[in-house]
Amino acid sequence: MKLLVLSFYYAPDLSAGSFRTAALVRSLAAAAPRAEIEVVTALPNRYRSFSVEAPEHEHEGNVQIHRFALPRHASGMLDQSRAFISFARQVLRHVRGRRYDLVYATSSRLMTAALGALVARRTRARLYLDIRDIFVDTIKDVLPRRVATLARPAFSLVERWTMHRADRINLVSRGFEEYFRTRYPAKPLSFFTNGIDDEFIVAVAAPAQGGRSAEGLATILYAGNLGEGQGLHAIVPALARALHGRARLVIVGDGGRRAALQAAVASAGVDNVVVTAPVKRDALIAAYREADVLFLHLNDYDAFRKVLPSKLFEYAAMGKPILAGVAGHAADFIRAEIDNAAVFAPCDATQAAAAFESLQLRDTPRPAFIEKYARARIMAAMADEVVQTGSR
């Protein structure tokens, strides 16, 4: 069996999709040791402010990895589009004349899934899609209204063609189910969520850290993308003001709205916010362990009521109190699954400050959550299904 794994991001790049795909590939290699597994991805490019080296070609066991160089880009829509066009062209050249039994494509934005569908068609392969976001549903909120109005019909056509081409579709969030059941009722759906990587499970076993700063302030940490979807520029300045003298907010990451966040902090005149560049995973885990509270926020858009942020799983694994500005499915998940976590309405600093006060500022071990959502267990089951889909 020949399997092609298509992902725009791949480890060691810093991205939820990269770590998810790397874990799946390890499970595929174990589940199908006689299969030829080919990973096609890009060289690390997630953030301009964070660079990590990776070889263009790797070969280990029954897995080959091909990484393509992309033009330098920030996080704007236009330059990301150019980067993806470059990636798509290189992928299509690479697969020309090849044959696969299955193409697996993971996609937070629609176009990687569409590229996977095109590759599957050209190589006469079955197609397994891993959907991590509903792009057509999101663009109405994150793009200017006029642009979204013009773009949405075209992307809806692309989505329809892509999904109809798939033999099986996995959704990382149960919040997506109604959307897909309504539009693609004949398609078989699976629900393999994001999960907790081994690095975070090992970190939990180490002695707990954390504690107030020298000034007696609690540390509230956010680590991840700083984009329109996270909306930190809309909550952090007001929350910092509300918690002045009680907490400081440490923001680790980069993205298209980092400048807006820094400008909003400066305009608010608050001195209890620190914004730093992305860091490698070992440094990230150390930062988690030193924090008192882990912070999560999604902007106040209808589309985000369906998502389940991957960040939530590693946060919960660390045993720290969690302060989450989310609504819909993510809010329901937190209330049902995670102890010592407080939810507030997105972009509402008053609610956020009250939610912070409700937390117990101590570590809360969550062994049942870790066992249930260990990435290795989830990916092993998903790998079996991917192999079965390719074998039919």
Image: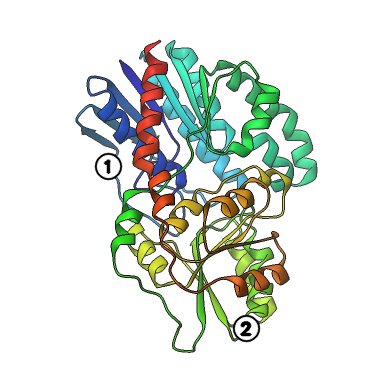
Task: Write down the quadrant of residue 10 in the picture.
Answer: top left
In the image: residue 205, left or right of residue 156: left
Q: Nearer the viewer, residue 370 or 83?
A: 370
Of the numbered discs 2 and 1, the one sitting upstream in the chain is 1
Is the residue 318 above or below the residue 75 in the image? below
Residue reaching furthest to the bottom:
215
Q: Quadrant of the N terminus?
A: top left
Q: Which residue is mark 1?
A: 55
Image coords of residue 161 (percent x, y): 62, 19
Q: Nearer the viewer, residue 146 or 299?
A: 299
Q: Quadrant of the C terminus?
A: top left
- Residue at 36%, 73% (x, y): give it: 209
Kind of element beneath mark 2: loop
- Residue at 36%, 25% (x, y): give it: 384
Task: Write down the quadrant of residue 33 in the picture.
Answer: top left
Q: Residues within 10 Å of mark 2 (few under 14, many from 20)?
A: some
Mark 2 vs mark 1, foreground winner is: 2
How many labels were placed on the picture? Answer: 2
- Residue at 68%, 31% (x, y): give it: 179
Kind of element beneath mark 1: loop
Residue type at the position of mark 2? His
Residue 56: tell me if it is visible.
Answer: yes
Q: Which residue is mark 2?
A: 244
Image coords of residue 4 (percent x, y): 37, 24
Image coords of residue 156 (percent x, y): 69, 27
Q: Nearer the viewer, residue 75 or 336?
A: 336
Mark-to-mark CA distance, 2 and 1 = 46 Å
Image coords of residue 82 (percent x, y): 55, 39
Is the residue 189 above or below the residue 368 in the image? above
